[in-house]
Image (tube, helix red, strand yellow):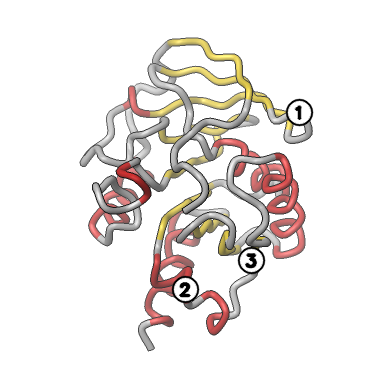
Amino acid sequence: MAEQEGVIKFSYEFEKRLTISEVPWEMQIWRDLFVGYELIGQVPDRYGGFGFGNLSCRVGEAFSITASQTGGLKRLTASDYALVDDWSLDRNHLSASGVKEPSSESLTHAAIYDSCPSVRFVFHVHSPLIWHARGPLGLPETSAEIPYGTVLMAQTLKKLARDIGSDGIIAMAGHEDGIIAWSTTAMGAGSLIFRALHQQAG
């Protein structure tokens, strides 16, 4: 693929400190499921061996997100999450804190949170099965010409998510196997992904 997975493309200010005392249970449960189905992970023969997939949840006016390149870890601890507390899609910039840097997809998540105040969870996974069936499944999608981690991707996702509403799933045609889902609940976001996985299986 033309892009390199896991590379941070935005500018950012970062304060190194622990931001949460424990991993939110909803995040751990859903991440365990996604890892089990290889929707999140890190394997040598996919995406150049880089980790893939990330989760976030809203925390007040900020959001907590899995840190960069944590896909290969079986279980995450509090130090594997970063808090993003300010961002600008237009400037491709954010402010964050944590023991590790925030995910390279952080502005993508920010775009979804910007689109609808009631959204509380955003899950980004990599599913070849869903991604290749996105047409028959009727999934909304971003243009194949828009790579991940760009201002245009964030702006496009924000508009699509605003049009779709507080529960939705989108295929990222310019981000190999990339699927992003969001909802007011973790169950809602996760169910959208597994429903699509079930539907493509026929």
Query: Which x, y percent locates residue 105?
Result: 53, 40
Q: Of the residues shown, which amino acid type is indicated by label 2?
A: His
Badge 3 or badge 1: first in the primary sequence: 1
Q: Of the residues shown, which amino acid type is indicated by label 1?
A: Arg
**How much space separates mark 3 and mark 1, taking CA atoms?**
23 Å
Residue at coordinates 44% horizontally, 71% vertically from top-left? 130
Badge 3 or badge 2: first in the primary sequence: 2
Tag 1 residue: 91
As helix, strand or loop, the secondary structure at mark 2 comes to: helix
Tag 3 residue: 141
The foreground one among 158 and 5 is 5
Horizontally, is 124 left or right of 112 in the view? Answer: left
Query: Which x, y percent locates residue 151?
Result: 71, 40
| Residue 132, label in figure | 2
The foreground one among 21 and 140 is 140
**How much space separates mark 1 and mark 2, taking CA atoms?**
32 Å
Dot 3: few (<14), some (14–19), or many (≥20) neighbours within 10 Å?
many
Residue at coordinates 51% horizontally, 35% vertically from top-left? 104
Answer with the quarter of the image where residue 199 lies: bottom left
Q: Of the residues shown, which amino acid type is indicated by label 3?
A: Glu
